[in-house]
Image (cartoon, rainbow, N blue to C red):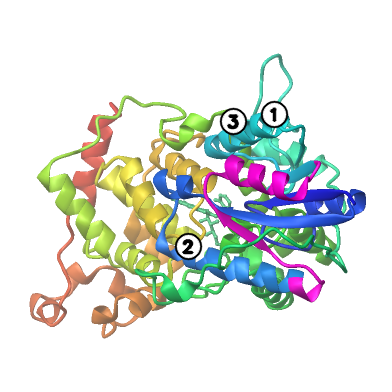
Amino acid sequence: MTVAIVLFTSDLRLHDHPPLHAALASSDEVVPLFVLDPGVEAAGFAAPNRRAFLADCLRDLDSGLRDRGGRLVVREGEVAEEVGRIVSETEAGVVHMAAGISGYAQRREERLREALSSVGCRLSVHDAVVTAVAPGSVVPSGAGRDHFAVFTPYFRRWSGEGLRSPFGAPRKVRVPEGPGSAALPSRAGTRGLSPGLAEGGETEGRRLFTAWRRDGLASYEDRHDDMAGDATSRLSPHLHFGTLSPTELVHRARATGGPGAEAFVRQVCWRDFHHQVLAARPAVSRSDYRPKQDRWRTGRAAEADTAAWKEGRTGYPVVDAAMRQLLHEGWMHNRGRLLTASFLAKTLYVDWRTGARHFLELLVDGDIANNQLNWQWVAGTGTDSRPNRVLNPVTQAKRYDPEGAYVRRWVPELAGIPGSAVHEPWKLPREERRRYDYPEPVVGLSDGLARFKEARGLD
Ligand code: FAD
């Protein structure tokens, strides 16, 4: 009897799962394993919303495996030690897993490789599981160049890559008797959740994608920036936890075709783009990709401004609406992410790391590659070719929430102001303004701009 272990990490699904597919093809029995690693918590990557979503994902994975005659084995502890224990309990000859991308995941893989080699067990690492195209497999020409720093040429090369065909879900999974499992975590016990948090799990992810492909994909190109329309896929948490496979999404979107599908595939490519930057430069999770000698504001005034930003009380309705959506749902519309990040890093001139940390504390899709590199992109220390552009929240609001419906949804105290006037409550007559329990702007936009230009030495 040959036994293989499949170590699930950011790939909590049964469809299109190359490590599971390889294990089932070459071994008689398979141990599907997930290790709850306290190191994730210690590194500050865990957060209530993601812990709850993860619990949904693990329960759904277990139930999918049970439908196929198997079960999920959950252990708690340091990954290499826990896998080593299961190897000795089952005499497994091989461990299959997806290639790690972040510095944390790369170190975990390294420790696992060492631990397994000392007990004569093989580690088989599979590419293109977490991303559609493996980091490092598409690189610019020239010696020593290990990643693309500019999106458009990356997208061109990425689009020309022949993606592997997706695998179906297995019909049967035989798990050896023996390896015991810790109790599956449950969302019920998680404190501090956003009240409108989405449901996790592969079943829900596939339902969402099917519905969105039917109803939303065709109009995605025209509507993705419509903040009130909420017309993006909302698949980001499923991509983050790997309950959906990016390879399968790209194949299915391309099979549907049309400008909406093309625009969607381009966004999935942005995800791969940031992952290949992070894989090549893991330190960018904390340090600037392209430092600008910023001397970010600190001290009491900066702290008060940051607190107002976090609470959604900056006095700029569209910024506040987006920050409140984040608090309520653990998710924010991409246009909201862009303009709230620009507001913190450029208008308030507060270190992007402060904002990125807050996002990671709340976002259910909070992801080191996408979050840290998008924050850097907006702050102008990352890969944006126009690092000093500043998004004006009023202009953005009028363009992407022209009727003001998004603001009225999330800032109910302004619900009585009709149309786009809701974006500039400070323009209302004084008596009318008094009727709304809403703060004055924390900073004038021209003052913020002047401070930023001076700090960056711009004209
Ligand atoms: P859709 O518009 O439907 O796009 C489909 C998928 O493409 C998304 O699910 C996502 O996986 C990917 N995608 C879309 N835009 C981007 C992008 N700019 N960069 C990378 N991938 C993208 N995305 C995260 O998944 N996790 C994060 O922690 C995160 N933090 C962000 C922080 C800031 C400051 C900014 C500006 C953006 C951030 N994004 C992050 C990217 C983007 O905002 C979200 O992926 C998107 O809003 C998710 O909604 P959706 O699934 O409906 O996206």
Circle nearer the viewer, 2 or 3: 2
The residue that label 3 is drawn on is 149
Find out if the beta carbon at label 2 lies less than 8 Å from the nearest ligand 1 atom: no
Q: Where 404 falls versus 246 (above or below)?
A: below
In primary-sequence order, the first of circles 1 and 3 is 1
| Drawn side of residue 92 relative to residue 383, left or right | right
Q: Where 93 falls versus 440 (above or below)?
A: above
Q: Where 304 falls versus 185 (above or below)?
A: above
Picture residue at 17% right of the left edge, 74% below the top: 428
Q: CA distance from mark 1 to mark 3?
A: 38 Å
Q: Amino acid at mark 2?
A: Arg
Pick the front one: 298 or 60: 60
Residue 315, position in %: x, y?
21, 64
Using a 10 Å C-alpha cutoff, classify the residue at mark 3 as few (fewer than 14 neighbours), some (14 to 19) or many (20 or more).
many
Residue 263 makes an appearance in the image: no
Circle nearer the viewer, 1 or 2: 1
Q: Amino acid at mark 1?
A: Ser
Q: Which mark is residue 118?
A: 1
Question: Quadrant of the image for the C terminus?
Answer: top left
**SS at badge 3:** loop
**Would you say the residues marked 2 and 3 are in contact, meaning their CB atoms lie under 8 Å apart?**
no
Q: CA distance from mark 1 to mark 2?
A: 33 Å
Residue 439, position in %: x, y?
15, 67
State yes or no: residue 249 in magenta.
no
Q: Which mark is residue 51?
A: 2
Q: CA distance from mark 2 to mark 3?
A: 32 Å
Using a 10 Å C-alpha cutoff, classify the residue at mark 2 as few (fewer than 14 neighbours), some (14 to 19) or many (20 or more).
many
Tell me where the magenta segment starts and ends, as one range: 66-93
**Would you say the residues marked 1 and 3 are in contact, meaning their CB atoms lie under 8 Å apart?**
no
**SS at badge 1:** loop
Residue 356, position in %: x, y?
38, 47
